[in-house]
Image: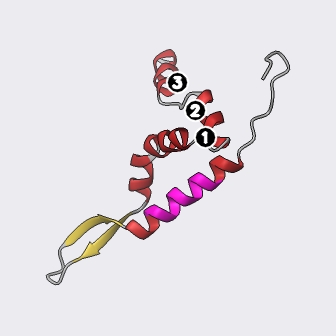
Amino acid sequence: MEQKNKQTEERNLLPFHIIKAASEGDVEAIHAVLAHYEGYIAKLSTRKMYDEFGQVHYCVDETLRRRLETKLIAKTLAFRPVPYKGVQA
């Protein structure tokens, strides 16, 4: 059971070369990072709204979504991978 969960987690990870390229400013890699986290960002920015009849509607707060995307881009660009002694960069 644990082996299956580990494989599922590994499939959901971004490849390191994309993370490294995004941290170096590669636009395509940054788009890949944003696409990877798109659903999670949408989930975090979903808000409960009420219409004039009191009915509940769930909507994505676009301002919050953009702020989260901007923060993700800034943190990605600031990321510096630690070199591993056994691997040449």
Kindly identify which numbered label has been placed on residue 18.
2
Residue type marked 1: Ala
Q: Residues within 10 Å of mark 2 (few under 14, many from 20)?
A: some
Instruction: Check the image and name the residue furthest to the left.
Output: 53
Q: How far separated are the C-alphas under marks 3 and 2?
A: 15 Å
Q: What residue type is disc 3 on?
A: Glu
Q: Is residue 72 magenta?
A: yes
Residue 67's tag is none
Sequence-wise, which precedes: disc 1 or disc 3?
Answer: 3
Q: Are marks 1 and 2 in contact (CB under 8 Å)?
A: yes
Q: Which residue is mark 3?
A: 10
Task: Tell me where residue 87 sits by quadrant.
Answer: top right
Kindly identify which residue carries mark 1.
22
Q: Is residue 58 above or below residue 34?
A: below
* Bounds of the magenta segment: 65-74
Of the image marks 3 and 2, the number of the one nearer the N terminus: 3
Seen from the viewer's position, the closer of residues 81 and 5 is 81
Residue 36 x %, y %: 46, 40
Kind of residue at disc 2: Ile
Question: Which residue is situated farthest in the bottom direction here?
Answer: 52
